[in-house]
Amino acid sequence: MKIAVVGATGLVGGVMLQVLEERGFANCEIVPAASPKSVGKEIDFAGRKLKVVSVDDSIAMKPDYAVFSAGASASKEYAPLFAEAGTTVIDNSSAWRKVPEIPLVVPEINFDAIKPSDRIIANPNCSTIQMVLAVSQLHKAYKIKRLVISTYQSVTGTGIKAIRQLEAEEQGLEADKAYPYPIHRNLFPHGGDFQPDGYTTEE
């Protein structure tokens, strides 16, 4: 089996590689793919060194699966290209979550929503996955009518750049900004991309 990990040099991509190794995929052919600035870098996987390739090159390698954690923009651009090449894409971004014809799946709950013809599969937000694993059983038993949810999420979901911004702010230093507002000792509503007028739009 050949598996591409798109966004392999990012924070979440690194965890995906770790999980693949832990879950018995250590002997599979793993194709780490990332942005042009990371091409040629080496990463460790299951005791061997893997060289990072471009996303275009990883598509040409026709992997069986492509696991995406490179943000919604990259998913919108590249997931259809993988799908056209016959690869099944499992996307971790918000790109496909509201597209009716693309299954939104938590395997323990609705794996049967995936059809053999599906080439792009979306998954919910991380906090949603944890919640519905518990709530789904309650719903089966009692038929829940309404949920009111508030989540408070860390900057790690945005990636390494956001963590570096937070660390720099803690030390009173300047850093490249993942967010246009201070993170340290701050809490702000954020869903999607910040716009110049301060409002946000969901990706």
Image (tube, helix red, strand yellow):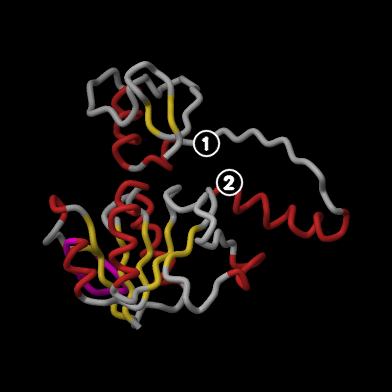
Where residue 193 sits, quadrant-wise, is top left
The secondary structure type at the circle numbered 2 is: helix
Q: Which residues are magenta?
A: 44-54
Position of residue 192 relative to residue 103, above or below, is above
Q: Neighbour class for label 2 at 10 Å: few (<14), some, many (≥20)?
A: few
Q: Which residue is tagged 2?
A: 127
| Quadrant in which the N terminus appears | bottom left
> Which mark is on residue 153?
1
Position of residue 4 relative to residue 190, above or below, is below
Position of residue 120 relative to residue 198, above or below, is below
Where residue 79 sits, quadrant-wise, is bottom left
Instruction: Give the residue at x 35% y 57%.
Output: 13
- Horizontal and vertical percent for residue 46? 32, 73
Instruction: Give the residue at x 81% y 55%.
Output: 138
- Horizontal and vertical percent for residue 69? 37, 54
**Amino acid under label 1?**
Gln
Instruction: Give the residue at x 82% y 60%.
Output: 140
> Which mark is on residue 81?
none
- Horizontal and vertical percent for residue 80? 33, 62
- Horizontal and vertical percent for residue 41? 14, 59
191 part of magenta stretch: no
Looking at the image, residue 29 sits to the left or right of residue 116; the answer is left
Instruction: Give the residue at x 43% y 31%.
Output: 201
Circles 1 and 2, Cβ within 8 Å, touching? The answer is yes
| Quadrant in which the C terminus appears | top left
48 part of magenta stretch: yes
